[in-house]
Image: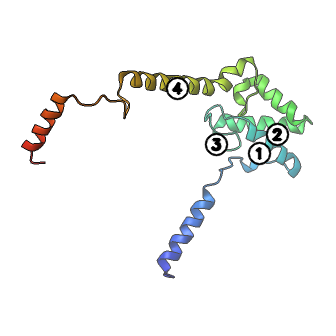
Amino acid sequence: MNTPGVRSLILAAVLAAGLAGPAHAVNPDEVLPDPKMEERAREISKDLRCLVCQNQSIDDSNADLARDLRVIVRERLKKGESNDQVLQYVTDRYGDYVLLRPPFKATTLLLWAGPFVILAFGALGTAAYLRNRRAAGTVAGDTAPLTEDERRRLDALLRKDGI
């Protein structure tokens, strides 16, 4: 079991697992010299959506717009703004859609309530379907017993087939 092929396979699996983590797309020229400020920039970047990729944060995206947003975040931090002020600046400029976790308010109500509305319609549709099946007598166990004529025909068919 300790063959070179198995060891190579295990090494490849470990390397693949290590590479499967998030790919941070921050370029070296974007990194701030102050580690604490860079940490703040990364924290903010993880909350902002890449408007090109849509399902990635700007921290993970290689898109040009994501890079521009990362630069804006770092510039605002250099000016001494708080994390909330930076997020507010970007949100004012691009709207709530730029936030990966948009706030709960009237303009985002459909976004937050939509999945629950769809689930409710699905549950109502399923209930109506099952009620109609039961009313039609097609649910297992709800079928009417065979009449005497049907039973004779079935017995004749079974005897003909040798069963």
Residue at x 73%, y 23% (from the top left corner)? 95
Q: How many marks do you count on the picture?
A: 4
Read off the residue under disc 2.
74
Q: CA distance from mark 1 to mark 4?
A: 47 Å
Task: Check contact, mark 2 vs mark 1: CB within 8 A.
Answer: yes
Q: Earlier in the sequence, mark 4 or mark 3?
A: 3
* Nearest to the observer: residue 70 or residue 123: 123
Is residue 4 visible to the viewer in this orientation of the structure? yes
- Is residue 127 placed above or below 56 in the rendered structure? above
Mark 4 vs mark 3, foreground winner is 4
Read off the residue under disc 3.
62
Residue type marked 2:
Arg
- Is residue 88 placed above or below 16 in the rendered structure? above
* Nearest to the observer: residue 102 or residue 11: 102
Q: CA distance from mark 3 to mark 1?
A: 13 Å
Read off the residue under disc 4.
122
Badge 1 local density, few (<14 within 10 Å), some, or many (20+)? few
Q: Earlier in the sequence, mark 2 or mark 1?
A: 1
Read off the residue under disc 1.
30
Task: Check contact, mark 3 vs mark 2: CB within 8 A.
Answer: no
Residue type marked 3:
Asn
Residue type marked 1:
Glu
Mark 3 vs mark 1, foreground winner is 3
